[in-house]
Structure formats: structure tokens, C-alpha cells
Image: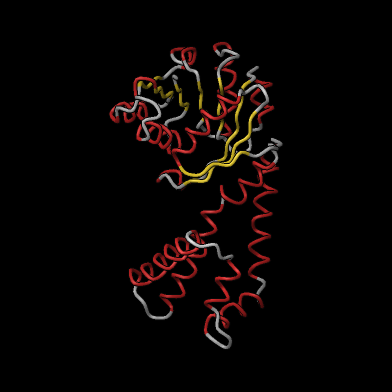
Amino acid sequence: MKILIIGGGNMGLTYAQSFLNSHITTKENMMILEKSPEKAAQLAKKDIGTVYGEAKDCIKTADLVIFAVKPQDCEKLFADLKPYIDLQQVFLSIMAGVKISTITEVMGAKKVIRAMPNLPAQIGMGMTAFHSTDDVTRIELVMVQNLLATTGKTLYVENESSIDAVTAISGSGPAYVWYFMQSMTQAARDMGFTESEAELLVNQTFRGTINLHTKSNLSCDEWISRVASKGGTTEAALASFEKNELKEDIINGAKAALDRAIELGKK
């Protein structure tokens, strides 16, 4: 299977390296299309596949084409590709806000998969949700899922509209976590710890808590009750969170991200 990744940025490079590291493909079957001569030269040095500068030189031989470019560049890209595509080719898009209908209508493609990965994919711990057109065969869908799984967990969603919700939760989610970590780190500094001490306290707390949670069958509420003894320090913090409606703020923030994802999809 010949794979063409369009875009040699962070995610394009992440996919190329993940596919090769998992031995799901070889560099002989990997192609990368990168318009920037500087980036193309850097990619060529990594020896992860053949690097091209023009679509017409590589797209016809690809079985799977992955769009890993900025959404605002999609219309020109689709127009450039249209003369060269084959209806049997599978197209996988990770462009935020770009609907499947846009790809099928502008390019005339039939087999299209839309996916939403997140940043931890760069270390093989990502979360990717995806949806496809009916023309994508079961074998092709499994093939793409196996590729996506090299960067972490995957979830197939029955409705494309769910991709916007995924964007708001797991796509943007890492930023929410870092925001909370940043706040806790600031609190630790205010309590007299150095920057490095504060980061150690917060980073290890998050790392240990996530691992503990994933290795058990307890719910978040059950874990909270185990930490928060009556009249204790944790209960005091949780009471402050409740008073300031922190949970509602987090929920409303995620909903704001969803609204923006839907808005971007209309453009």
C-alpha cells in the first residue's frame, strides 16, 4: 500500500514516523508532499520516504492520501489535486472543520475519511475519532484504523457531526489539562516552592493520578471520595471549586469550543 502524506508539518511527520516505527509500512511505500523547499529539504534528511514538491508527481501512485495541512489551504489544494485523483483512492483528512461533503464535492472523491487526532499522538498516546463515507470498504476502514492506532487510541463515530464534539473534548482537551496544571503550578509557587519544585509536584501528581485511574474500575466520584475526608483539606478545596462553579465553567468552555468548531465548519 502506497501512502501519500500531504503536509510535512508536526502531524504529517508524526504519522510518517509512527507508521514506520510500527512496521505497518516501509519508507519505500511512503511519500510526502511538501510545498516549502526548506521543509522538504529537512524531511529528505530524515529518510522517512520520498519527498515531493508537486502533486502531479506523486498522487497517482498513492492508495491512501492523507491531508495534514491547515484548513485554510484546503480549497486550493483540492483544486490542484482534482485532475489527478482516482475514485478508488482513499482520502483521509485531519483538517479541523473541513467537512467530508466539501472534499467530495470539490474533488469528486468518493472514499473519504475524516479524523480528529490530538497532540499526544506525537508520543503514541493520542486520541483519534474518525468517520467515513459509505463508499469506504470495511477492509479499507480497518486499514486506516490500524494506521491511526499507531498514534494511540481510536474511536469510530457513526455521525460526522460527532467530530465537532470530539474536537471540543479530546482535540482541544490537552490545552484544558495544561491550563489546570499551570494554575496548580502557580499556586505551588505562591506557597513558596521554586519553579522546578512546583513543576515536579504538579507533573507527578497528574501522571500518577491518570495511571491510577486507568488501572482501576473506580469512577472519578469514587476516587474523589477516597481522597476527600470529611472536614479535611481536599474537602475545603472542592467546596471552593463548587462555590465558584468551576465544573460549570469547564463544561461551558467545552461547549464554547464545540460552537466554534461548528462555526468553522460552515465557512
Q: Residue at x 59, y 21 (%)?
A: 78
Could you say which is closer to the camera, residue 250 or residue 26? 26
Q: Residue furthest bottom?
A: 231
Q: How many marks overall?
A: 0
Q: Is residue 232 above or below residue 72?
A: below
Percent from the top left, x then y, of residue 135? 65, 21
68 to the left or right of 158: left
167 to the left or right of 38: right
Question: Which quadrant holds the C terminus?
Answer: top right
Q: Where on the picture, by quarter, is residue 89?
A: top right
Q: Residue furthest front?
A: 217
46 to the left or right of 249: left
Q: Is residue 36 above or below residue 63?
A: below
Q: Where on the picture, by quarter, is residue 129?
A: top right
Q: Is residue 89 above or below residue 101?
A: above
Could you say which is closer to the camera, residue 104 or residue 225? 225
Q: Where on the picture, by quarter, is residue 109?
A: top right
Q: Is residue 199 above or below residue 265?
A: below
